Amino acid sequence: MTEDFHKPVRRPSETFDRLFAAEDPAEVSRAAHSTAAALLSRVREEADPGAVERLVSFTTRHGIDDIAELWSRSPAKSLPGALWRLYLLQLSIHDDPRTAALVYERGRAELRSADAVVAGAPMPAGPGELVALVDTILRGAFQGDFAVALDRAAAFCRVQASGATHLADDCEPTEPSRASELTRRALRLSTYAADLAAAARLWRRESLT
C-alpha cells in the first residue's frame, strides 16, 4: 500500500482537460457534487449489476485520473469527498495487497474493538481476501446501504492504522525510516477513518451532499 494512497497517474483524458481548463473552483465544486449525486442515484435506481461492477473495477481499467479530476478537491465531509476516499482506499489495497494484509493482521491482533468485525474481513486475511473485501465495500456503496459501506471502510482504516502504528514501533530501533513511513501511513488512515465515519453520520441524517 502506498503511503499517500497514490500512484503515478496517466495524462487526464481530453474530456476532463476541456471540462476544467478554466480551473474555476466554483465550477469544479459544482461538477464534483453533481456528478457524485447523479452517479450514485442512477446506479441505485437502475439496479444494474453490470454497472456496479464497472464502477468497482473503474480504476483498474482506467486509472485514477478521471476520478481525481472530479472529486479529489472536494471536502472530506461531502458525497464526492467520501467517494474519492473509498476509491483511494481500494487503490491502496490493490497496489500492494501483501503489505496491506501484513498491516491489517497486525492491527486486528492489537486493536481492542469491534472494528475488524465491522470491516468484515475473514480471519486471517491474506492479500486476496483484502482485495476482495475492499471491492465488496465499494460495491456496497453503490448497491447497498451507503452509510454501512462508509462505516465498514472507516473500521477497515482503523484496523490498518493500528497495525501500522504497532509495526512502526517494532521498526523504530533498527529501521527508523521504515518506522516513519508506517507512522505517516497510520496518521493518514486514522484521518480517513474519521472522515468516512463522519460522512456516514451525515448520510444517515440526509445531510451528505
Image (spheres, helix red, strand yellow):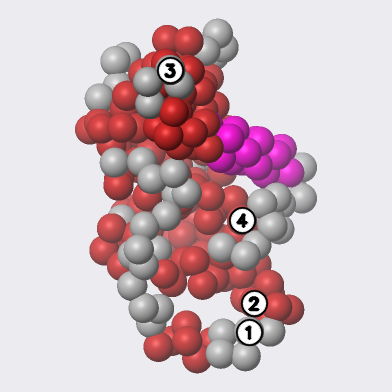
Looking at the rendering, in which quadrant would you find the C terminus? bottom right
Judge by depth and name the residue closer to the eye, 204 or 157: 157
Provide the secondary structure element on which disc 2 rests. Answer: helix
Q: Do the residues labelled 2 and 1 touch (CB within 8 Å)?
A: yes
Q: Which of marks 1 and 4 is nearer the N terminus?
A: 1
- Characterize the local packing of mark 1: few (<14), some (14-19) or many (20 or more) Cα atoms within 10 angstroms: few
Does residue 50 appear in the picture of this structure?
Answer: no
Magenta region, residue range: 186-203
Residue 194 colored in magenta in the image: yes
Q: How far apart are marks 1 and 3 (CA)?
A: 46 Å
Q: Do the residues labelled 1 and 4 touch (CB within 8 Å)?
A: no
Q: What residue type is labelled 2?
A: Val
Q: Distance between the residues labelled 4 and 3?
A: 37 Å
Q: How far apart are marks 1 and 4 (CA)?
A: 18 Å
Classify residue 66 as left or right of residue 75: left
- As drawn, the label of residue 81 is 4
Q: What residue do we see at 31% from left, 32% from top? A: 99
Q: How far apart are marks 2 and 4 (CA)?
A: 13 Å
Judge by depth and name the residue closer to the eye, 60 or 177: 177
- Characterize the local packing of mark 4: few (<14), some (14-19) or many (20 or more) Cα atoms within 10 angstroms: many
- As drawn, the label of residue 173 is 3
